Image: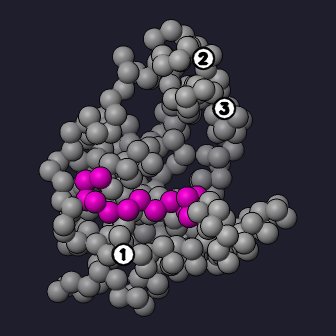
Amino acid sequence: MESATISEIPVEKSKTNELVGPVILLGAPGAGKGTQAKRISEHYGIPQISTGDLLRDNISRGTSLGREARIAMERGDLVSDELVCLMVADRLEQPDCARGFILDGFPRTVVQAEWLDQHLAQRRFFQTEKGSMQPVVIELVVEYNFILRRLTGRRTCPTCGRIFNVNTTQRPRVEGVCDIDGSALVTRKDDRDEVIIERLKNYEGQTLPLVNYYAQRNRLRKIDGRAELGQITSDAVKAIEDGDSL
């Protein structure tokens, strides 16, 4: 049985005119951040902002930030926090962010989180009668073994790009074969056990301090990332709706 698309799964009545403010999604690789970011984006009519997309966009457009990032990458260096933060700052000034935005993949470190807090305060984003709206931080909590099973089960069609999963209800109708075009499915390098384990280790070392940072400020809301897709979205929407009263 094929999984339903995002648009086929009911979400609470959309609220595309209200002030939402900043939303931050946290979670380990494979926790479902990208899927939920898209659903929340559609629900509220606010943009999903991914640092990976920002980086690729700046490089492809040849901006000054993109040129600096390309030089760093060609040297084999990581793109600096400063460059990433400048790209985010530029993106947040765009008109479609006026009611709110969802940050997917940013901040990744406590340093970036501190910068974001300062930037939002200095720019006086999202002012209400109660003051400036603080970020609502949602962590999708999924246990290690569940993520490992989910990611190692992914199979990709090299022709159409469709993704299946032999460990979930997204299994192909015929084992090892794409339902759409009959191509032989492959396991991407990023979905191999050793790569996934290393990514999870990196997440624990880098991002868990970030989780603690927001928990200490009473901004963190944890959601069970193993729940049914629509339930996760409903829980996320409730966390956002309640965010301004924290």
Residue that mark 1 sits on: 95
Q: Is residue 130 visible?
A: yes
Query: Is 87 positioned to the left or the right of 41 in the image?
Result: right
Q: Find residue 49 and report its horizontal and vertical position in percent.
A: 46, 62
Of the residues tagged 3 and 1, which is closer to the observer?
1
Question: What amino acid does circle 2 point to?
Answer: Ser
Q: Find residue 3 and report its horizontal and vertical position in percent.
A: 36, 26
Q: Residue at x 28, y 72 (%)?
A: 99
Write down the region rendered in magenta: 42-54
**Badge number at residue 188:** 3
Asked if residue 48 lies in the magenta stretch, the reply is yes
Q: Residue at x 22, y 72 (%)?
A: 19
- Colour treatment of the image: one colour
Spatial distance from mark 3 to mark 2, Cα to Cα? 15 Å
Task: Determine which quarter of the picture holds residue 197.
Answer: top right
Labels 3 and 1: the sequence-earlier one: 1
| Cβ–Cβ under 8 Å for marks 2 and 1 | no
For label 2, the crowd category at 10 Å Cα-Cα, with few meaning under 14, some 14 to 19 and many 20 or more, is some
Q: Is residue 21 visible?
A: no
Of the residues tagged 3 and 2, which is closer to the observer?
2
Vertical order, 4 against 77 (above or below): above
For label 1, the crowd category at 10 Å Cα-Cα, with few meaning under 14, some 14 to 19 and many 20 or more, is few
Query: Is 23 positioned to the left or the right of 53 in the image?
Result: left
